[in-house]
Amino acid sequence: MAVTGTDTRTPDSFGTVGVLGAGVIGLGVAADLALHGFRVNLVDHDPAQCASAPARLAEAARIAPMLRPGFPASADRAEAAVQIGTDPAALAECTLIVENVTERLDVKEDVYRLLDTLVTPTAVVAVNTSSIPVARLAAHLSRPERVIGVHFMNPPYLTSAVEVMRPEATTDATLARVGELATLLRKKTIVVGDFPGFVSNRVSHLFFNEAARVIEEHGVAPETVDRIFRDCFGHRMGPLQTADLIGLDTVLHTLDHLRDATGAPRFDSCALLRDMVHRGQLGRKTQQGFYTYQHPAREVPS
Ligand SMILES: NC(=O)c1ccc[n+]([C@@H]2O[C@H](COP(=O)([O-])OP(=O)(O)OC[C@H]3O[C@@H](n4cnc5c(N)ncnc54)[C@H](O)[C@@H]3O)[C@@H](O)[C@H]2O)c1
């Protein structure tokens, strides 16, 4: 099922959109919104993430139009449209908030308790999670009917669809609002149920984990694993390149959550993945994962 927004909305009619979490995906969501003409308040509790955000935003705004032509806002205007800070009070004026904090249930639950004290009664909260059921987080808000899952793929400004997770309590109006947002971002919506990992990550994380296990158990080079998927199956990126792009810590948190939520041993993470995260080799964001990268800020696969 897909939902298409009406064309009566404009970015201005959304007022200011809040983006909570300025990590890999939150920064990309903020860049995508700004390049499509939205005003954005980007909030992260980590001052270091806020300090590096302008450079990461500038890089995204420079690259995105080359790879996906047709953004309505120039790179300069997009950069100017994003206000960055550590104070969550900046979310109080927002009509829609995209939450992108660390993929840990305890962290996200604290954030939803805080959001309940901040957001206006009419604001929509879009949960950008890799595996946590949306209803579990919505339960911490007094208006769970205004909460919905919107799973952006990385990097958001280059993708043409989002996976939408609709819990039972979510109203048609909330769904329509997200449809309008997606239309303005030139994205389709694909609506799925609200179960751990949804469709995308329930499948893809087994694939990432198994690709790492092939290296661990049989010594196959990462390049070889990825080439099989690019050259034989025609995938744009191999599983290990994709895992590096997402962030290996996020991949590991997602596998852990899938294992805890389903009880299925197939989601047990392999030792290589756990060791790499333990050593701080998190993929592109630390310049070292299955591959070595020269540009920490560059979110786009090269
Ligand atoms: N990386 C991806 O490709 C991807 C894609 C879709 C969804 N997601 C989901 O989006 C979320 C973020 O993922 P990410 O890859 O950007 O992670 P990340 O680790 O790169 O960034 C998480 C950010 O959240 C911030 N944060 C943590 N607690 C906070 C709090 N209480 N208040 C404000 N900021 C806080 C951190 O400082 C950090 O900057 C996760 O739920 C993840 O599963 C990630």
Image (cartoon, rainbow, N blue to C red):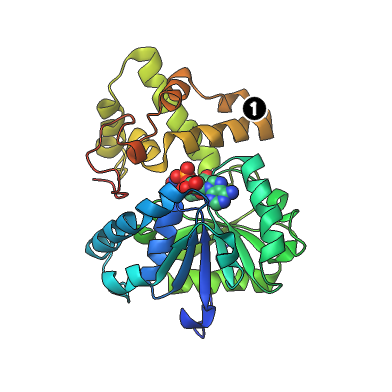
Image height of 288 relative to 123, above or below = above
Q: Residue at x 55, y 39 (%)?
A: 202
Please indicate whether residue 15 sits to the left or right of residue 124 in the image: left
Question: Where does residue 222 sit, x and y in percent of width and height?
Answer: 29, 26
Residue 129 in view here: no
- Which quadrant of the view contains residue 172? bottom right
Image height of 215 relative to 166, above or below = above
Comparing 39 with 201, the one in front is 39
Question: Where does residue 119 sit, x and y in percent of width and height?
Answer: 66, 67
Give the labeled residue for mark 1: 264
Question: Where does residue 32 sit, x and y in percent of width and height?
Answer: 39, 64
Please indicate whether residue 238 sits to the left or right of residue 259 in the image: left
Please indicate whether residue 174 sits to the left or right of residue 201 in the image: right
Does mark 1 have its CB less than 8 Å from ligand 1? no
Q: Residue at x 59, y 73 (%)?
A: 93
Image height of 59 relative to 120, above or below = above
Residue 13 in view here: yes
Q: Residue at x 68, y 56 (%)?
A: 114
Quadrant (top left/top right/bottom left/bottom right) for the N terminus: bottom right
Quadrant (top left/top right/bottom left/bottom right) for the C terminus: top left
Indicate the secondary structure of the residue bearing disc 1. Answer: loop
- Which quadrant of the view contains residue 112? bottom right
- Which quadrant of the view contains residue 263? top right
